[in-house]
């Protein structure tokens, strides 16, 4: 409404000093939880169907249904029990979860940050690889004093990722190259670069013919707490999340990133440089993904020892990161939570495999199902009636231009 | 007749009737017990400010929203409309403000869309339908033209055709003129009259008084969700505005004569600008704006005004000539540098360029000063200062928002524009460039925005306003520069007749236009209502 007189409406003075009045997104939470439940239900069906023993009991289901049902319940209960025990069942499993989650969180933050600027960063994988190359190189070839060595190695990894990401921003801003294409291609380049470097005298371990580097110094390895897998990398991941929150919400650069992401035209009209913002965003996103590579290179092995640089060092962290960021709705807190969830699934999946003889691929399927259901909230609302009523109540249709007052 | 009819009168035997329609969104009552009769062969204007509930009411009618109370009748029998498909089946057609067309499809393909009915598509039949309907209503639409290549006015006609192809008897036009040029508006009016004469019921939603008076058979005024009365099209604009806003509205801008500075502040010399496609759209243009005066650039849309404004901000490169502000050269500099040099800028399309819709009011108010003192300390945003600033601006500009943390996209058009203007006017300016400053803004807010623009002028700023609305030009300008094909045809005083301005907008030089329209020879044969936009044809 404009300058009209008329019936009372909330006086501006009353609400003026109110702090951020954004309501807690209950609908999102309910939908996400419902997505989990659905994913685990479908996962249970997959387990039952894929297990020959259980399946055989279903052949005489109508004679003795109890056999089939008990076998199914045992199978599913055992597997999910192992999953739970392996991820959150005690100090050991919990720390394993954090160790698995830390690189996912870092790389996920790199994807999420870029997403806030309207950039789809598929290149976390490449940025993580380059980050691991830089960090590992400093780790095994510069023999610096303790503490300093670790700091320098971490910093090198950040720089490596920032270069790889910044390159994307520069190509997009300067030459109009689409970031999706460029990041995908640079993933291949980074993987190839790592393969090549591991055959050079600088990187290859003396006396070895296979692609493996010297082992990183103790002084450049993340120290870990006794009795578990929790190491300094997880703390860095949380710090990175706090930094990303501050950077986006409290810094001038973050303001520009959000503005460019939400409406590049208005941002340009207000005098912001879209090109500059793109380069900065991609460099910072690259540094965050690079930190994931640092985690992979400098994190201790399961037995707590320093590790060498190998071709598969970052695994598929960079790709899982995209899922983590999407699941976390591109917010720092969401990314941390999603990273922890995926870390738990990774950790629990290993336990599920060894304890319940359920193939590890099932955890992959579970991850995929969770993401599928989270990405399709409409599907969830259709399948779970409780969510539907909740949703309809919380966010009814808004008339065009009609709610403004 | 069902017993839940609360309306005062029984629904008519033919036509569409709403009785006691109430629609609530949480605690907000968007429509409160609305009664409305829509009769075939009439143009029914629904007049109300932005946010008054017109669109909500029509969305109820079109099945996009379900009413909390009330009943809809078609030809005297009650109907329940759950979705647009049922609305279409009941003969209701909607021409949306933002067209629902697939831009890369042809006109005929768009017509088939949603009515495929089986696998085989009969494009031939679709083409024939387009031709038949176009002929019947005297439209000029090529069935094989691709929609995105068509001008906005023609795209709108495709929307109308879509409704007609569904045998719509009741046609709802939701703010159809907001996106049109004055000429296209005239053409649309002719189309609406043709539809009425064919026996269709036309509902015309608008807040533009001139259009209402020109075309309406019946006027229903809606204010804050309720019908406040019906009005005669012969009522004066002031009376209609009063009904709509709920108080007397000053349609004439109060302003003292301009006291322009001796030296021009904003100078455009031999300015040429090419658009994104490389065509020269501003062609060696010269214009001076002195401090303390408002110069309005008038013209039919598409004569280079938009690009002129873009070039002033530096978002389009200047290909020749220069722009200077107080002697400083602006051409060739970045938007940031130009903004810092003291240029305020109100973009033509505020949704697109003026603000970030998902950002809060407070954030949008510092969109171009967020990185400077006092809002930033180094790289850190000073949120307290940003919020203080927002409190001040919201009060000063009477921005109607729930809180300063409300996203701007949920404000009404007028208040969105106030946010943009508040941001631009809250810093010391040497010049202000405002494109279509009141487009899509309701009457009450227009009055306010105009007074702020005049206030900025009185502070000694050089104000350049680009507008296609002659009413606005006449109300605001101290001098009118008419633009045609990238050049200024002439600079005339604001009291120049509409006819003369219209001729100039068609490229006739100022002296000829003034001579041709002197009271002795009127160009128009038939007598017109005094306020008619003669010159825009």
Image: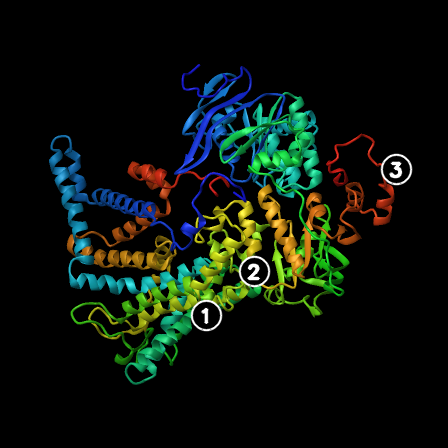
State the image quarter where residue A177 is shown: bottom right
A23 relative to B134 in the view: left or right: left
Q: Provide the chain ID for the residue under circle 2.
A: B
Q: Residue at x 44, y 61 (%)?
A: A114
Whether callout 3 and callout 2 share a subunit is answered yes
**In whole angstroms, how far apart are the C-alphas of marks 1 and 3?**
67 Å
Colour mode? Answer: rainbow
Q: In x, y percent, where is residue A349? A: 23, 56
Q: Provide the chain ID for the residue under circle 3.
A: B
Of residues B203 and A30, the one drawn nearer to the viewer in this rendering: B203
State the image quarter where residue B346 is shown: bottom right
The answer to whether any part of residue B270 appears in the image is yes
Q: In x, y percent, where is residue B169? A: 58, 23
Of residues B249 and A114, the one drawn nearer to the viewer in this rendering: B249
Of residues A192 and A295, the one drawn nearer to the viewer in this rendering: A295
Q: State which tag comes first along the sequence, 2 or 1.
A: 1
**In whole angstroms, how far apart are the C-alphas of marks 3 and 2?**
48 Å
State the image quarter where residue A337 is shown: bottom left
- Residue that carries the numbered disc 2 in the rendered image: B426
Q: Are marks 3 and 2 in contact (CB under 8 Å)?
A: no
- Residue that carries the numbered disc 1 in the rendered image: B379
For the residues carrying marks 2 and 1, which lies nearer the camera in this image? 2
Of residues B199 and B114, the one drawn nearer to the viewer in this rendering: B199
Q: State which tag comes first along the sequence, 1 or 3.
A: 1
Q: Are marks 1 and 3 in contact (CB under 8 Å)?
A: no
- Residue that carries the numbered disc 3 in the rendered image: B520
Q: State which tag comes first along the sequence, 3 or 2.
A: 2
The answer to whether any part of residue B150 appears in the image is no
Q: In x, y percent, where is residue A256? A: 49, 62
């Amino acid at each position: 409404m404009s300058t009209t007189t008329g019936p009372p409406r909330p006086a501006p003075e009353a609400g003026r000093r109110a702090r951020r009045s954004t309501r807690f997104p209950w609908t999102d939470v309910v939908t996400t939880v419902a997505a989990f439940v659905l994913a685990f239900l479908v996962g249970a069906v997959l387990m039952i169907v894929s297990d020959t023993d259980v399946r055989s009991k279903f052949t005489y289901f109508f004679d003795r249904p109890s056999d089939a049902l008990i076998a199914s319940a045992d199978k599913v209960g055992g597997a999910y029990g192992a999953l739970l025990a392996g991820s959150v069942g005690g100090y050991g499993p919990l720390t394993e979860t954090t160790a698995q989650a830390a690189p996912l969180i870092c790389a996920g933050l790199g994807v999420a940050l870029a997403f806030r600027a309207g950039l789809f960063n598929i290149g976390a994988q490449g940025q993580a690889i380059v980050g691991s190359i830089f960090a590992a190189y400093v780790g095994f070839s510069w023999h610096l004093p303790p503490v300093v060595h670790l700091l320098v190695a971490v910093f090198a990894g950040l720089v490596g990722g920032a270069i790889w990401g910044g390159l994307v921003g520069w190509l997009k801003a300067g030459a109009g190259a689409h970031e999706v294409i460029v990041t995908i291609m640079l993933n291949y380049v980074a993987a190839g670069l790592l393969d090549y470097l591991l055959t050079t005298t600088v990187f290859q371990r003396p006396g070895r013919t296979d692609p493996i580097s010297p082992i990183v110094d103790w002084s450049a390895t993340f120290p870990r707490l006794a009795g578990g897998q929790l190491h300094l990398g997880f703390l860095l991941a949380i710090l990175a999340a706090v930094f990303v929150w501050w950077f986006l919400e409290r810094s001038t650069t973050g303001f520009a990133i959000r503005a460019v992401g939400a409406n590049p035209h208005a941002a340009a009209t207000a005098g912001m440089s879209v090109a500059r913002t793109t380069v900065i965003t991609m460099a910072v996103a690259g540094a965050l993904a690079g930190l994931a590579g640092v985690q992979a290179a400098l994190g201790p092995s399961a037995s707590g020892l320093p590790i060498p640089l190998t071709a598969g060092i970052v695994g598929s962290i960079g790709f899982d990161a995209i899922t983590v960021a999407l699941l976390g709705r591109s917010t720092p807190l969401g990314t941390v939570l999603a990273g922890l969830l995926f870390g738990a699934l990774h950790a629990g999946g290993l336990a599920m495999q060894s304890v319940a003889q359920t193939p590890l691929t099932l955890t992959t399927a579970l991850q995929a199902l969770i993401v599928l259901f989270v990405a399709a909230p409409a599907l969830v609302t259709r399948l779970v009636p409780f969510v539907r009523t909740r949703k309809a109540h919380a966010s009814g249709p808004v008339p065009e231009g009609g709610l403004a007052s | 007749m069902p017993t839940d009819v609360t309306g005062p009168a029984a629904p008519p035997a033919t036509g569409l009737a709403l009785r006691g329609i109430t629609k609530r969104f949480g605690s907000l009552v968007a429509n409160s017990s609305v009664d409305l009769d829509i009769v075939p062969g009439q143009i029914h204007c629904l007049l109300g400010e932005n946010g008054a509930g017109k669109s909500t009411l029509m969305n109820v009618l079109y099945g996009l929203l379900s009413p909390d109370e009330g009943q809809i009748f078609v030809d005297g029998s009650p109907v329940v409309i759950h979705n647009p498909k049922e609305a279409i089946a009941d003969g209701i057609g909607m021409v949306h403000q933002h067209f629902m067309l697939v831009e890369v499809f042809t006109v005929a393909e768009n017509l088939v869309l949603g009515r495929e009915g089986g696998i085989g598509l009969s494009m031939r039949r679709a083409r024939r339908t387009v031709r038949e309907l176009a002929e019947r209503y005297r439209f000029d639409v090529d069935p094989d033209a691709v929609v995105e290549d068509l001008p906005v006015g023609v795209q709108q006609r495709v929307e109308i055709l879509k409704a007609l192809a569904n045998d719509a008897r009741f046609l709802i036009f939701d703010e159809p003129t907001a996106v049109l040029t004055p000429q296209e508006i005239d053409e649309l009016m002719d189309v609406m009259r043709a539809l009425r004469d064919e026996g269709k019921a036309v509902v015309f939603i608008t807040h533009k008084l001139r259009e209402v008076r020109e075309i309406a058979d019946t006027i229903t005024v809606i204010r804050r969700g309720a019908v406040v009365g019906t009005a005669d099209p012969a009522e004066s604009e002031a009376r209609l505005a009063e009904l709509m806003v709920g108080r007397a509205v000053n349609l004439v801008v109060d302003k003292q004569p301009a006291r322009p500075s001796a030296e021009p502040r904003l100078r455009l010399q031999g300015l040429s600008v090419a658009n994104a496609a490389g065509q020269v759209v501003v062609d060696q243009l010269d214009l001076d704006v002195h401090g303390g005066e408002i110069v309005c650039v008038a013209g039919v849309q598409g004569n280079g005004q938009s690009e002129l404004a873009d070039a002033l901000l530096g978002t389009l490169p200047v290909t020749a000539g220069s722009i200077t502000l107080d002697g400083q050269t602006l051409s060739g500099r970045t938007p940031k540098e130009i903004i810092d040099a003291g240029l305020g800028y109100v973009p033509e399309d505020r949704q697109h360029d003026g603000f970030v819709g998902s950002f809060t009011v407070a954030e949008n108010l510092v969109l171009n000063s967020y990185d400077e003192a006092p809002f930033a300390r180094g790289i850190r945003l000073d949120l307290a200062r940003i919020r203080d600033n927002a409190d001040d601006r919201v009060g000063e500009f009477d921005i109607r928002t729930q809180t300063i943390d409300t996203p701007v996209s949920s404000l009404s058009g007028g208040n969105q524009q106030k946010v943009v203007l508040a941001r631009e006017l809250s810093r010391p300016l040497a010049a202000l460039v405002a494109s279509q400053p009141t487009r899509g803004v309701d009457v009450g807010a227009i009055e306010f925005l105009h007074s702020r623009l005049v206030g900025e002028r009185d502070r000694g700023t050089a104000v350049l306003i680009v507008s296609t609305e002659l009413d606005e030009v006449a109300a605001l300008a101290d001098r009118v520069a008419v633009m045609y094909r990238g050049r200024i045809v002439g600079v005339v005083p604001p009291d120049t007749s509409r006819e003369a301005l219209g001729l100039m907008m068609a490229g006739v030089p100022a002296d000829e236009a003034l001579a041709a329209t002197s009271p002795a020879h009127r160009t128009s044969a038939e007598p017109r209502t005094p306020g008619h936009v003669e010159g825009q044809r």
